[in-house]
Image (cartoon, rainbow, N blue to C red):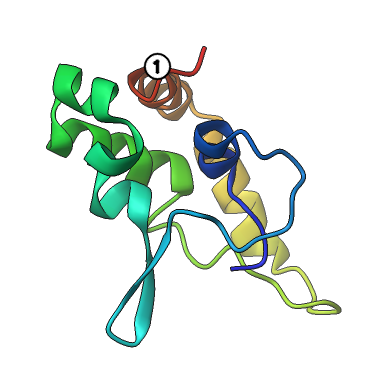
Amino acid sequence: MATLCPLGQFVFQRHAWPGPCPGLTQVESDYVCGLVLDPRKYAPTQTARYGVATLRWAALHLIGAGDGCDARFNGEPRNHAYGDALDAECLTPRRVSMSRIAKRLWGAK
């Protein structure tokens, strides 16, 4: 809502730009990532090439779905134990390899 994630910055070519993200989609009373919800709308060529399920997986991986909330409020202290564990997980060879694959699926280098 406040800014674009790195995937949104790549897809919408908006770097260091305040939000909301153009892909942010309201579904009933919740907001969801449109890149996950309907990748065909934002990357039709990549979706035709790799399929909806594959692009959804790649988007979910790149936005960190399932890793916990990434939004901190101003002044909110960092949870060092959680942050350190997440940093360590993100740097494992398997995670780095999956991130490279996910980026390539979306057309990033």
Residue at 66 percent of width and 51 percent of height: 84
Considering depth in this image, is 63 or 12 the residue closer to the camera? 12
Residue 14 appears in which quarter of the rendering? top right
Residue at 69 percent of width and 69 percent of height: 79
Residue at 16 percent of width and 23 percent of height: 48
SS for dot 1: helix
Q: Extreme top residue here?
A: 109
Residue 72 appears in which quarter of the rendering? bottom right
107 lies above or below 65: above
Left of 14 or right of it: where is 30?
left
Left of 75 or right of it: where is 109?
left
41 lies above or below 13: below
Q: Residue 9: x percent and y percent?
A: 60, 39
Which quadrant would the N terminus be assigned to in this image?
bottom right
Considering depth in this image, is 41 or 75 the residue closer to the camera? 41
Residue at mark 1: 104
